Amino acid sequence: MQRHRVAIIGLGVMGRRMLTNMAAHPRFSFSGVWDPDGEARHKVAGDFPAIPIAAGPDALIASSDTDLVYVACPPAWHKGYVLAAAAAGKPVFCEKPLGIDVAESRALVAELARRGTRTVVNFIQSTSHAVALTRQRLDSGDMGAIVGGDIVVHFSKWPRDWQADADWLRFRAQGGFSREVLSHFVFLAGRLLGQARLIAARPRYPADPALSETHQQAMLDCAGVPVGVFGSTGGTGPDRVEFTLWGTKRSHRLHDWFWLQSSEGGDWVKELANIADPRAANFRRLLDDVAAFADGKPHVLPSAAEALAVQELIEAMLRS
């Protein structure tokens, strides 16, 4: 099968993570990679000496050697690189969010539709085994009626230690855990239950107006199902990342991103116990779907329009 030649724009945490996994996947090779930071380029050149380091983004995106453009820079620059790929006639795989300005992102989605540019956005759980099993049980009626959902995240430190190089995440202009983490679960709520609508939100910010939110409380309505949202930072203890769907027959609890538990009224029971490392398994499934997208075949990755709907909700939550 064809190896898709990928141009990676942005070599921060996500860019390097995707590069590492794509390099191990049989369906991808690289036309080149680029980042404005010389140290980031130097690190990739040392770790992946066979991958070309481009002199700049424009020629790399437009190159006849590029089949797919992966945009992994901070969100304020997504629009420019996505439009460059669209102008070059290249399909796009973009990190979320599409941007930080809702009006600009609406215009971007309209332009992508006008040009017919095929675009998908990386909400990482869209391809997970846990979500696939949840979807199956929702459709079969095994969970009964869904009476509510809860999204709960807590981080003792924001940004997390492994995000130290992505300093922009701590600032209100582009960062914050609502955009970076809650968005994944707002997307899931909408995909599993129906289009999410914001009922109310109450964020809390630190005294420094430049810094991102420390707390977020919100209520969503997903096709009639109430979904509560709670996020916070600070204190000591383990991080918490959970999405629970409460069913009249069976409830599902997705925790720590990729692990799934269920309950029929008793204690939570581990699901998918045959998968030793759900995180690694999900990255393989994600890239299988990216390859299918690049092939023009069916996949479950979110469209730019789906990502815009999530961005609109998150930005409304942050403004409330």
Image: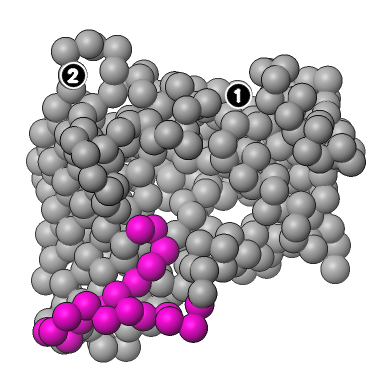
Disc marking residue 194: none
Does the magenta-highlighted stretch encompass residue 266? yes
Q: Identify the magenta region.
A: 256-275
Q: Image point 46% across, 61% down: which residue? A: 126
Which amino acid type corresponds to the residue marked 1 in the rendered image?
A: Gly
Residue tagged 1? 80
Place residue 138 in its image quadrant: bottom left
Q: Secondary structure at mark 2?
A: loop
Quadrant where the C terminus sits is top left
Residue at point 35%, 76% (across, down):
134
Question: Tag on residue 206?
Answer: 2
Q: Is residue 116 above or below residue 320?
A: below
Q: Amino acid at mark 2?
A: Pro
CA distance separating discs 2 and 1: 31 Å
**Magenta includes 202?**
no
**Along the viewing direction, whichever of 219 and 118 lies nearer the viewer:** 219
Question: How far across and how far down the image is residue 109, in percent?
Answer: 50, 38
State which quadrant residue 207 falls in.
top left
Give the dominant element type of the magenta stretch: helix, strand or loop. Answer: loop
Does residue 129 lie above or below 151 as drawn?
Answer: below
The residue under the point 21% across, 69% down is 245
Q: Is residue 302 shown left or right of residue 289?
A: left
Residue 171 placed where, x, y %? 35, 20
Q: Could you tell me residue 24's position as x and y percent?
A: 75, 58
Q: From this viewpoint, is residue 231 visible?
A: yes
